[in-house]
Amino acid sequence: MRVFLFFLPVFFSFQLAFAQKENEEYQLHIKRTTSAILIDGVMDEQAWEEAEVATDFFMVLPMDTSFAKVKTEVRMSYDSENLYLIVNCFHNEGQKYMVESLKRDFVFGRNDNFLLFMDPFDDQTNGFSFGANAAGAQWDGTMYEGGKVDLSWDNKWNSVVKNYPDRWIFEAAIPFKTIRYKKGIKTWGINFSRLDIIIAEKSSWAPVPRQFPTASLAYTGSLLWDEAPPDAGANISVIPYLLGGLSKDYDARKKATYRKDAGIDAKIAVTSSLNLDLTVNPDFSQVEVDRQVTNLDRFELFFPERRQFFLENGDHFANFGYGTIRPFFSRRIGLNVPISFGARLSGKINKDWRIGIMDMQTGKVDSIELPAQNFAVVALQRRVFSRSNIGLLFVNKQSVNYQPADSAKHIYSSFNRNLGFEYNLASANNLWTGKFMLLKSFSPGRPGKNWVHAANLQYTSKKWTIGWQHEYIGRNYSAEVGYVPRTNYIKVNPLVSRLFFPKGGKVLSHGPRLLTNYYFSTSMNQTDHETIFIYLLNFRDQSLFDVWAGDVFIDLLQPFDPTNSGKDTLARGTKHRWKAWGIEYISKPQSRFTFGFSTRFGGYYADGNRLNITTDLGYRFQPYVNIAINTSYNNIDLPLPWGRTDLWLIGPRVDVTMTNKLFFTAFLQYNDQQKNININTRFQWRYRPASDLFIVYTDNYYTNPLYIRNRAVVLKFTYWWNL
């Protein structure tokens, strides 16, 4: 508690010291067009002749000390329905662009691209991002936490990219119905980012220090409207789906099961910045399956949410807490259970207040005696100072009409609740960031010791990164709708790193990084520690290399199989120490063939040894085909009864993009640890903006002997209808 009381005034003092927006002097005026604009990649409309030009971009990488070498020009306009953007991305005469494919929401660092970062509330915290690569693949996402982009968000807008000998032009129309903004605000935060990977240069219109992403909303300039942006008007979208499918479980020796289903989503703009989402009988069969990993961890692994309904403003609910202290994790809802219906009200009330209210109802499952359950979440956030905020979160999981019989084989809790408070620090110049958090859970039979406290503070400059984080989780803390893989501990996690910048040569920067994690029981007995020293080299061609060494101590609190493959377990209370080292390399992204690898050599549990080698290979037949294969090999040598264990994970993948509206993906995952081979193929035709036809085929096989486990094919049709 003393640490708690110390950190809070420290956070507030940093806010008072840095309160002014960094790039206020960078301004772009936008005015209403008097003529129609055709989205064709040709700059021949009168509106573009009259529009103000944003140019003279600043270099961000490799160094942030000069103007960009490549020239970029941006013009913006609008009418009563759309926000318009046209961008001239100049390059050397005859220079070929470099992209992976025409796949939507491409990997930023592997494509020549242009991105728009837009902060319609000018609060330097939340916003939207739109863009395209040089072949015309679209990028769109919501922005949160001052500079992160969630690319899972998908909405309606139009764009065209046209290539010329000395440039490529990106032209877009973004409907006002697509974005959220407060009526009457005439100043928006805005920045533009350009990546030319052929010459290895990243640049931005308003300057951004190289240690931060160009998405950092702390460094946006200002978009000044000649009049308040137009009211989007009635903004109601209905998105029905129809689905047909066939599946067969060969393990259970069951007959094929036919599936016919329908459901509907709706989006209702309560205001221009506040949205109500409704869903009835949602289906997520088209969502790409999770990428498998070899699991050698003692605790549950985290896999991100991919379902569309949970994604818009999803950060407001899901990002409360830390990576391993999440009181709300939407994947707990509808896990192998049908979702009957749900509603979510989310968005901005005004520049300072943000709200999120969600309620989901799941059906019961008689085979495991699981009752129907209701999930309710309330999140409230208040901006303070220039970029920081205070947040409150309440999560309630309630079993509906649940009274377990005396003969019940499965017992479920009648309710589980979490109440939390956090303060998020972000200084005006982004050099200081941090978080201060308190959580309390409420569950039947778990009185006392159900608190969580955690805090961190980090300083990030061009040369230095210095941070501290500590966590406390009580023994009886419970978050049934969250992701908290470990409880009953105290953790401290300091880190420090330093970068050096040579004046010339192939190395752009290099330097050491030291980080450590110490875990203690709540009675302050040490249970774990891991200390890692890394030396990193960043090359001017954007390739990366690092070498690391680590020291590990673990006092097992529960029995554990160090191979996670169903063999014997190490006893609770046994102590294990080892040292390990490794290297990692990622090749430059400018090549059609890219590769990377990492290694790990050293000790392991029970005085054993572990070798791990991972590789990532890729080849692009641009812009239509991208081929990749990821491989992980673990060799674990332990005393009997484990002996030698070899674990392979192999994942080839092919992305074929016939156009930026027609996609085919096929990938295979061979997982030696799970004795499973998964084949997944997905065809997607975006026949109109945000409306799709999906055909998804999935197979699962045993590895030895090769034998089919289950198979499924799904045809799904969605249509986005604006009322």
Image (spheres, rainbow, N blue to C red):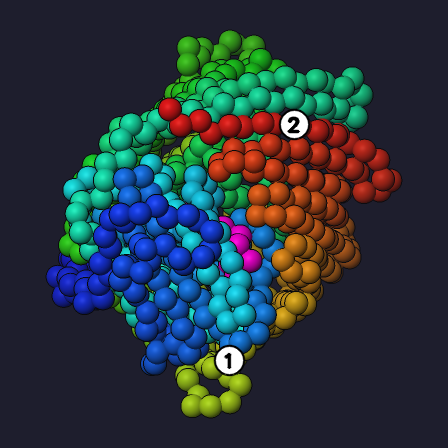
Q: Main secondary structure of the magenta part?
A: strand
Is 612 left, or right, of 530 in this rendering? right
Residue type marked 1:
Arg
Between 663 and 412, the residue placed more toward the observer is 663
> Magenta residues, as a range?
133-142
93 w.r.t. 487: above or below: below
Horizontal and vertical percent for residue 389?
22, 49
Residue visible at 54% across and 24% down in the picture:
241
Residue shown at 45% from the left, 10% from the top: 403
Disc 1 designates what residue? Answer: 540
Quadrant of the snapshot with the C terminus: top left
Q: Is residue 444 above or below residue 647?
A: above
User: Which residue occupies 27% across, 59% down?
Assistant: 50
Q: Residues within 10 Å of mark 1 (few under 14, many from 20)?
A: many
Residue 602, relative to residue 5: is it above or below?
Answer: below
Residue located beneath label 2 in the image: 715
